[in-house]
Image (cartoon, rainbow, N blue to C red):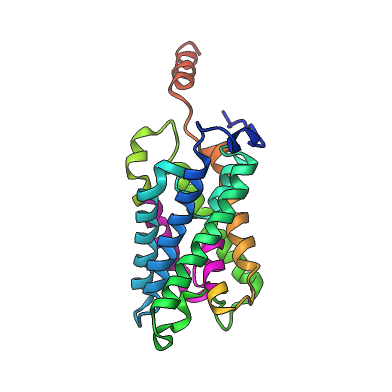
Amino acid sequence: MAGKFEYTLGVNELKSKEFRLWQSLIGEFLGNLILNFFACGACTQPEDGTFKALAFGLGVFMAITIVGHLSGGHVNPAVTLGMLVAGRVSVIRAVLYIIFQCLGAIAGTAAVRTLLDEAYYNGLGHTNLAANITELQGLGIEFFLGLVLVLTVFGACDANKPDSRYTAPLAIGMAVTLGHLGTIHYTGASMNPARTVGTAFATNNWEAHWVYWAGPILGGIAAALIYTQILEKPAAAKMRKLEGAHDYA
C-alpha cells in the first residue's frame, strides 16, 4: 500500500528538548563541513575523476557515520526536501537543516581556501557545466543524480528493511561515488545544492547556479514519491494479512 503523507509545521520542535533540534542542526553543519573540506579538498589535487568520485563517496560515508544519529545524516538539501515531501520531517526542521547545511559547506570550503596557497586551489572543486553541456542538459543530469541518491537514502533507511540500516552510510556513499563516476566531467556531479553553495561562495562563481539547486531537488522529490508510493516495503503485519488473504483466494 502506498505511504500516506503527514505534514507538520514543527513549531513544537523549537522548544522541545525531546527533539534535540539544536544538536541535529550542529550535526548537519558538521556533516557538510566534513564533506566540503575533505572532498573539495581532494579536488585541489591533480588527480582524475575516479579519485574525486571516491573522495566524495567516502566524505558522505564518514559524514553520515559521524552525525547520522543526531540529524538522520541528510547532509544535502535534496535529501531533506525529499524527506519533507514524504512527511518524514517537519517544515521548520527542513528549512533549518538546509540553512545549516549551506553554512557548513561554506565553512568547509572556506577552510580549504584559507589553509592552502592560491597555487593549489585548482578551482576548489567548484561544479561547472562542461563546454558543450547546456543548462537544460545539466538540469537533466543533476535530476538523475538527485533521483538515484534519494532513492538510495529511502531504500537504505526503510523502517521495514531493518537489516539495510546497518549498511546505510556505505550504500549512500556508494551512490554518491556512482554519480560522480558517471557524470563528473559534465556537470561536476554536484548532487548536493549545499556542496555547490560552498564552492560558489569561495570562488564567487554563480554561473548556472540554479541548475545545481533545481536538478537535485526535483530528482529528490521524484525519488521520494516513487519510493513511498511504489517501492516501499510493506510492514510485516500488513504482509502477513495479505498472505493470509491469498491463502483463501
Residue 126: horizontal and vertical position, in percent? 51, 75
Q: In the rendered view of the protein, which quadrant contains the N terminus?
A: top right
Residue 45: horizontal and vertical position, in percent? 35, 80
The foreground one among 202 and 215 is 202
Q: Residue at x 56, y 62 (%)?
A: 193
Residue 59: horizontal and vertical position, in percent? 37, 61
Residue 143, above or below 51? above
Check the image and name the residue furthest to the top: 248
The foreground one among 79 and 116 is 116
Magenta residues, start to end: 171-199
User: What is the quadrant of residue 78 in the picture?
Assistant: bottom right
In screen coordinates, is 5 left or right of 56?
A: right
Residue 142: horizontal and vertical position, in percent? 56, 64
Whether residue 240 appears in magenta in the rendering, the answer is: no
User: What is the quadrant of residue 113 in the picture?
Assistant: bottom left
Q: Residue at x 62, y 62 (%)?
A: 213
Q: Is residue 190 visible?
A: no
